[in-house]
Amino acid sequence: MFLCKEKIVETYDSLMVSRPLFERSNIEYYRKERKGFATCIPRGFAFSNYLLINPTASLVLKNCDGQKTVKMIYKDLCNIFTDVRKKQIEEDLINVLYDFTKYNLLKWTGGSEPFMYDNIQMITDNISINTAKEGDIRKIYNFIKDIFSEAKTTNDMLVYTNPNKFMGEYVNEVLLRHKLFNFLEEFFVIEKDGRVYNIISIIIPKISSNTAAEIGIMLLDIKFADQIMEYVVSNIRQITTHYITKVKLKLLEDSEDSKLIGDIFSRMGFIKEGILKNEIGRKSEIIYSYFLE
């Protein structure tokens, strides 16, 4: 489940009757500027130091009081901007509401989150994959703590932890929540008969100039690895607000699991980009990358 503006045509009716509410508690700093502009710093948002909100967007935000529906806000804007095409006003309003939602400035009442798209995909009759949502945090934590932390790579299962990460980051529920809720790492959950079966996470770069995401952790059934990775690389750009051009897999050169994992991911389209000599202690790091189209 993730924010997706492109799918709004499927939830248009729901959007127009939903009531957006400006969530001031998610604001670290807010200041009105000259000529109707405003400066805003979202609380705990990793990808934006601040937002400069223009006068029209400020007007929209002011109307997000939890009482007015999107349709009511749209009609108010049409009455104000009489020289602008109504279709343009509607499109601009949807774009602004999407951006405010993306930066955690809004919560929605009177219905479900209109920009949230549930992209569940069936792998087999009883195995599914979906992007993690807030309600999944406890089962992700329990799976990592109870299953993943004890798992080893076999001929049937791939088990991996990014060599630049520590398992302690994933078995600490507070740190795990921080990763998920602050968009630092996206998790994909594979369920079998309604229970977590596999998992893979993608680390999102913190710096805007860095467009390379990385695999964080994964436990994958080798039989379904191709389908799972196809889902991940097809959806990662829609999930994150950060622009991503490739997904990297980092392996330690001398690890006994690296050859198996490297071979499998090479068959899935990952390209061996290079080797960083003595990158981690005295161990070299092999970089594989999947380039997004």
Image (cartoon, helix red, strand yellow):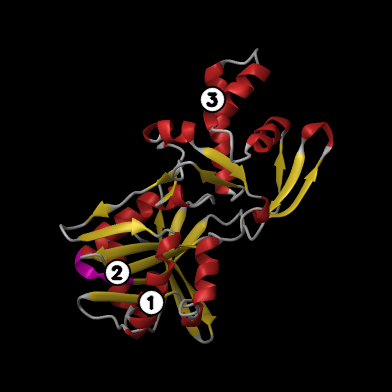
Judged left or right of residue 188, residue 207 is right
Residue numbers of the magenta segment = 219-223
The amino acid sitting under disc 2 is Val
Label 2: which secondary element: strand
Asked if the residue at tag 3 contacts the one at tag 1, i.e. Cβ–Cβ closer than 8 Å, the answer is no
Is residue 180 covered in magenta?
no
Label 3: which secondary element: helix
User: Of marks 2 and 1, which one's residue comes earlier in the chain?
Assistant: 1
Which residue is pictured at 62% across the width and 57% down the height? 45
Q: In the image shown, does 22 or 228 lie closer to the viewer?
A: 22
**Whole-percent x and y of residue 9?**
40, 31
The amino acid sitting under disc 1 is Asn
User: Of marks 1 and 3, which one's residue comes earlier in the chain?
Assistant: 3
**Whole-percent x and y of residue 235?**
38, 50
Q: In the image shown, does 124 or 27 lie closer to the viewer?
A: 27
Image quarter of residue 216: bottom left
Which residue bears the numbered disc 3? 90
Q: How many marks?
A: 3
The amino acid sitting under disc 3 is Glu
Vertical side of 110 occupied by 192: above or below: below
**Whole-percent x and y of residue 242?**
54, 51
The span from disc 3 to disc 2 (Cα, nearest Å) is 40 Å
Vertical side of 245 occupied by 219: above or below: below
Give the crowd class for mark 3: few <14, some 14-19, many >=20 residues within 10 Å: some
Judged left or right of residue 167, residue 41 is right
Give the crowd class for mark 2: few <14, some 14-19, many >=20 residues within 10 Å: many
**Whole-percent x and y of residue 90?**
54, 25
Which residue bears the numbered disc 1? 142
Label 1: which secondary element: helix
Which residue bears the numbered disc 2? 196
Asked if the residue at tag 1 contacts the one at tag 2, i.e. Cβ–Cβ closer than 8 Å, the answer is yes
The span from disc 1 to disc 3 (Cα, nearest Å) is 43 Å
